[in-house]
Image (cartoon, rainbow, N blue to C red):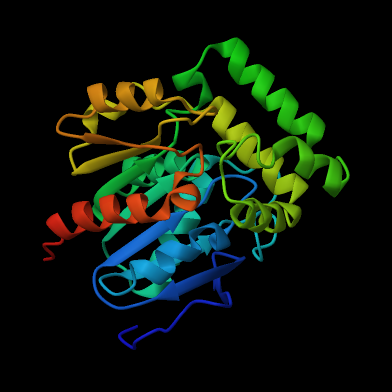
Amino acid sequence: MGSVHGPADHARQLEVQGHRIAYRIAGTGPALVLLHGFLCDSRVWRTQLEDLSDRFRVVAWDAPGAGASPDPPDPFTITNWANVLDGFLDTLGVERAHILGLSWGGLLAQELYLIHPSRVLTLVLADTYAGCTGSFSDEIAEQRLERCERESTLPAEEFLDLWVPNEFFTPAVPREIEAEMRTIVADRHPLGFRLMARSLAEGNTTEFLPSIDVPTQLLWGDQDLRSPVSVGERFRDAIAGSELAVIAGAGHMSNMERPRAFNEHVRRFCSAHTVTG
């Protein structure tokens, strides 16, 4: 995969372990793999694919059950997703990469490191969780899962009004960014959403975090309501040597709401840990 890729306007597809995976790719250089959250797909990484591809080979997938990737079977666990991701990277010829996961994608990034640590050069965990039961009380985890399951089958417009922009952005988000997110969330997979919500609700990586020994960057929107900065602070305290950068004026989707600041942090951190071998 040594050719130069231009702007990733359209998703490509490949087969991995019986799953058809859609993805976007741009640039050459060290691999930077972007993992989206639930209700999202690779389109949420538009500005990262555009801005960081001058320095990195940027890969953003649609996880099974999201975007243009068909639903996986039910049940499907975070370990199943991590194993498919490992196979996806194999198919692309990516041996080791900077792994950036946001929200649910951050839980997936942690799971990939747990079971396939040789894949991970660095971790960038953004607005994420140690699983819901690892970051919140059991009651909150249960309430969140019940809400996701209850609302997953609502008509599109009603669902969008409940989730966008309230769950993802600050009140000051530019209207065009809100509109972009509405378009993405409108294509949600109800089953994929429920499966991801379940894996997030049941996840608890708290005891695992101190064992992370690759360079780790934590990025958090200062107005994130779904995963407050206090969650990021607990990650920082648990992972030796990790650094927490708080992005002003950003909610949960800090990469979309404040892309310039987000990308500058990612570029600096990953460039400083780009030794390959």
Picture coordinates of residue 12, whole percent (x, y): 56, 77
Q: Specify whether 272 is left or right of 66.
A: left
In screen coordinates, is 25 left or right of 218?
A: right
Q: Outermost residue toward the right?
A: 155
Q: Quadrant of the C terminus?
A: bottom left
- Where, by quadrant of the figure, is residue 30 drawn? bottom left
Residue at (58, 34) in percent of width and height: 199
Residue visible at 44% across and 50% down in the picture: 255
Residue closest to the eye, 54 or 275: 54
Tell me if residue 214 can be seen. yes
The spot of residue 34 in percent (x, y) is 42, 57
Horizontal and vertical percent position of residue 129: 45, 30
Answer above or below: position of 270 versus 27: above
- Identify whether 148 is placed above or below 189: above
Image coords of residue 178 (percent x, y): 64, 50
Residue 77 shown left or right of residue 51 in the figure: right
Residue beneath the point at 46% across and 57% down: 85
> Which of 134 and 168 lies nearest the eye of the viewer?
168
- Residue 273 seen from this side: no
Looking at the image, which is closer to me, 35 or 211?
35
Is 19 placed above or below 177 here?
Answer: below
Residue 139 or 244: which is nearer the viewer? 244
Name the residue at 84% across, 48% down: 156
Quadrant position of the N terminus in the picture: bottom left
In the image, 86: left or right of 217? right
